[in-house]
Image (cartoon, rainbow, N blue to C red):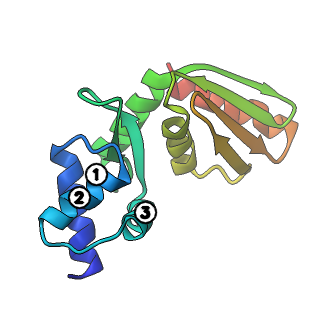
């Protein structure tokens, strides 16, 4: 089957099931006659910009957080607001502390803002480090991010 059909099915699966591993997603697709490997699923997850968020039945689940739909943008803002504990900066580095397991969720939101001053970011389990081009821009962006976390 074609890539687009498979990726559409992935979005349908994660919309109704809490899928927390690539292997589990691969098994679900294989049940539906999509002959896929874990490597294919890994590429699809990257292409679809899927992220892990806290689950209700499982510790984590895959979610699609990027869309042109304003309700999803609102969803991303809410996830950011709910997971952020502190936002601080030193020189040109911003450090965002999050609840456990939400560093990449905060990173996905910050990436979606596409600040041209951001050189790059690295997400851990409960921390997001953001490198900004200048100290002044780091202070300004940290202030903007704090507004999203209120």
Q: Quadrant of residue 11?
A: bottom left
**Relative horizontal placement of residue 83, taking residue 121 as reference (left or right):** left
Residue at position x 20%, y 63% from top? Answer: 29
Residue 27: mark: 2
In the picture, measured across the screen, residue 69 lies left or right of residue 1, that is right
Q: Total number of numbered labels?
A: 3
Q: Which mark is residue 15?
A: none
Q: Residues within 10 Å of mark 2 (few under 14, many from 20)?
A: some
Residue at image x 35%, y 29%? 59
Closest to the observer: 28 or 13?
28
Nearer-N-terminus badge (3/2): 2
Q: From the viewer's perspective, is residue 52 above or below residue 89? A: below
Residue at figure coordinates x 28%, y 51% from the top left: 24
Circle 1 residue: 24
Whole-number angstrom distance, CA of label 1 to CA of label 2:
5 Å
| SS for callout 1 | helix
Q: Alpha-carbon distance for marks 3 and 2?
A: 13 Å
Q: Position of residue 67 (x, y in %)?
A: 34, 55
On screen, residue 89 versus residue 33, left or right, reads: right
- Please state if 126 lies on the left or on the right of 38 as rendered: right
Residue at the spot of label 3: 42
Q: Is residue 111 above or below residue 74?
A: below
Label 2: which secondary element: helix
The quarter of the image holding the N terminus is bottom left
**Which label sits in the foreground, 3 or 2?**
2
CA separation, marks 3 and 1? 12 Å
Residue at horizontal 24 percent and vertical 82 percent from the top = 2
């Amino acid at each position: 089957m074609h890539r687009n059909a498979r990726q559409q099915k992935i979005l349908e699966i994660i919309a109704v099931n809490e899928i927390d591993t690539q292997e589990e997603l691969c098994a679900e697709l294989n049940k539906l006659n999509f002959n896929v490997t874990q490597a294919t699923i890994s590429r699809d997850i990257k292409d679809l910009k899927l992220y892990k968020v806290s689950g209700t039945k499982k510790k984590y689940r895959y979610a699609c957080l990027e869309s042109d739909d304003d309700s999803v943008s609102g969803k991303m803002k809410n996830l950011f607001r709910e997971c952020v504990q502190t936002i601080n900066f030193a020189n040109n580095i911003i450090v965002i502390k999050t609840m456990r397991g939400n560093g990449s969720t905060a990173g996905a939101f910050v990436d979606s803002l596409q600040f041209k001053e951001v050189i790059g970011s690295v997400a851990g389990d409960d921390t997001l480090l953001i490198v900004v081009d200048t100290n002044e821009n780091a202070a300004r962006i940290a202030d903007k991010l704090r507004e999203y976390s209120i």
